[in-house]
Image (tube, grey):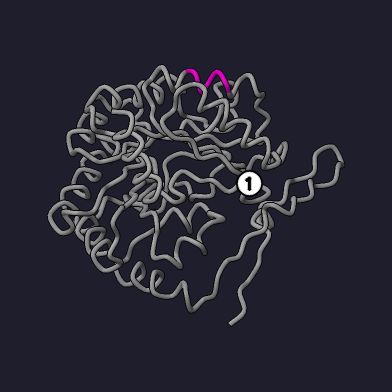
Amino acid sequence: MAEVVADVAAAGQSAPSSGSLPQRKPEWLRVKLGTAQLLAPTRRTLRELGLNTVCEEAACPNLGECWQQGHATVMILGEVCTRACAFCNVATGRPRAPDPLEPARVARMAERLDLRHVVITSVDRDDLADGGASHFVDCVDRLRERCPDTTVELLVPDFLRKPGAGERVLRSQPDVFNHNLETVPRLYSSARQGADYRVSLELLALAARAEPALFTKSGLMVGLGETRDELLTVMDDLREAGVDFLTIGQYLQPTRRHLPVQRYLPPEEFEQLAEQARARGFTMVASSPLTRSSYHAGEDFARLRALRADAN
C-alpha cells in the first residue's frame, strides 16, 4: 500500500493580510503520514477505550510516524477546553464533567499497546476547583498499579488560580513534569490569552524544586513573530527555573481562524537555537521544524536519564 505524503501546514495555510498572498510552505514541512493499515492498531485501541489524543485534536504533523509505532499522547478530561488560545486547534466551550473511569482506561491503553513510556496531557479545565489535578493523579495511580515498569510523563496545564493543584500533581511522582511556555511573554496577549507567563514559569520552578529525581520539561513554538533575543531571554528564564529539557518547534496555523505564521524558520536556525540552549545548560534540547513536546518522548526520556547518570 502506498504511503501518503502531505504538506503538514496545508490545513493551516496562512490567511492573507492586507491583500498579500499566503506564505508558501517550505519543502522541509512535508512528512509521510503512513498507511491506514499501519495506523489501524493504535487507532482501534484508542477508539475501543474511548480515549482522546492531542495528536488528533491539535492536528499534530507527527501523528503518522508515532501511531505506526503504537505511540499516542492521551488527552484526558475531555476534548473541550475552557480557553481559546489563538494557536490551538482544540475545541473551546463548556466541557462535560470528568469521567471517573477514564484513568483506568488510560492504564489499559498502556498495557494493550505495551508502552514503556506514557505521555498524558489535558485540556484546560478552569471550571474545576483543582483544574483537573486530581484526575492527573488518578491516571498516574492507575498506571503504577497496572503497568509498574512504565514511566509516566505529564504535560499539564498551568492550573491558574488553583492553589495547591501543582503540588498535588507532583505528589503523584511522575517521571517527567512538562508544562509548555509556548511563546515569549510579549505574545501572550495574542497567542495565549488567559495565561500568565510568570505563573507558568513558577509552576516549572515548583516542579524542579519538588523532587531531585524528577525531570522537568517545557516547549516553545517559533514563527509567531518573536525575536531571537526574546527567545534567548525565555531560555534564560527556564534555566533559572531549573528546567532540564527544552523542545522548540515550528508553529503551524491549524485553520484560517487561528494566528497566521509570520515566518517559517529553516532547519539550520533550529540548530542554532539548540546550540544557544545547550550553551545555557539544558540537559537536553530537541529543536527542529517538526519537533513537538511529546515527539519521541520515550526515547528522549531514556537519553535524559543516561545524560543525568553520566553527569553524576
* 205 or 49: nearer the viewer: 205
> Left or right: 225 with respect to 106?
right
Whether the magenta-drawn stretch holds residue 206 is answered as: no
* 106 or 284: nearer the viewer: 284
Magenta region, main secondary structure: helix
Residue at the left extreme, as displayed: 145
Q: Amino acid at mark 1?
A: Leu
Q: Position of residue 205 (x, y in %)?
A: 34, 22
Q: Residue at x 40, y 47 (%)?
A: 94
Residue that mark 1 sits on: 252
> Left or right: 226 with respect to 243?
right
Q: Quadrant of residue 211?
A: top left
Compared with residue 293, is residue 274 higher up or lower down, i.e. above or below?
Answer: above
> Left or right: 252 with respect to 194?
right
- Give, as a single range, the part of the protein colored magenta: 232-236
Q: Quadrant of the N terminus?
A: bottom right
Q: Secondary structure at mark 1?
A: loop
Q: Residue at x 50, y 40 (%)?
A: 286
Q: Position of residue 236 (x, y in %)?
A: 49, 18
* 163 or 110: nearer the viewer: 110
Compared with residue 64, is residue 189 higher up or lower down, i.e. above or below?
Answer: above
